Amino acid sequence: MDVKTEKINDVALVVLAGELNMDNSNTLRVAFKKILKENSRKILVDFEKLVFIDSSGIATLIEMFQNLGKLNGRMCLCNVNKRIIGVFEVTKVQKLFNIFVTREEALRSFCEAQ
């Protein structure tokens, strides 16, 4: 899995590629911790190039969601393919996250929430 991060205004963008699984979910956890250390409280996770997620990857996302909640932060997801949406629905985690079709919609949602 590849994790790239960048800032778009005050939103930390996390772009995932490949497979998010037990073997590499710690890579995402480390990226999230770095973002929090930089005092970012708005995180957008872009799934456009992610092809697979397992329970460990989902657990990492939930952990980040909970950590952000404690800091009054917010996390959104975008570009989630049908297969991964299906995994979210089976595990009921889609109810936790604001999931947007496009990156632009997700970024707008951060502006509207201010």
Image (spheres, helix red, strand yellow):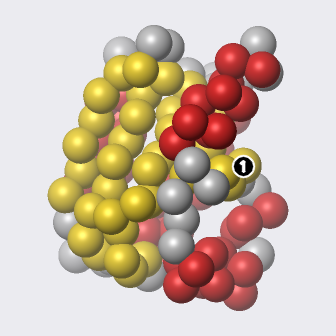
Q: Position of residue 84 (x, y in %)?
A: 54, 77
Left or right, 86 with reference to 64 = right
The residue drawn where x is 49% and y is 23% is 11
Q: Vertically, is 48 above or below 54?
A: above
The residue indicated by pointer 1 is 98
Q: Position of residue 99 (x, y in %)?
A: 67, 54
Name the quarter where the C terminus is drawn: top right
The residue drawn where x is 29% and y is 75% is 19
Q: Vertically, is 90 above or below 99?
A: below
Instruction: Give the image quarter of residue 54.
Output: bottom left
Q: Nearer the viewer, residue 96 or 45?
A: 45
The residue drawn where x is 64% and y is 84% is 86
Q: Nearer the viewer, residue 73 or 7?
A: 7
The residue drawn where x is 66% and y is 27% is 108
Q: Vertically, is 6 above or below 53?
A: above
Q: Report whether residue 46 is seen.
A: yes
Q: Position of residue 87 (x, y in %)?
A: 60, 83
Q: Position of residue 9 (x, y in %)?
A: 45, 12
Q: Secondary structure at mark 1?
A: strand
Q: Vertically, is 30 above or below 23?
A: above
Q: Report whether residue 26 is seen.
A: no
Instruction: Give the image quarter of residue 25.
Output: bottom left
The amino acid type, in three-letter code, at marker 1 is Asn
10 Å neighbourhood of mark 1: few (<14), some, or many (≥20)?
some
Left or right, 94 with reference to 35 = right
Figure label count: 1
Name the quarter where the N terminus is drawn: bottom left
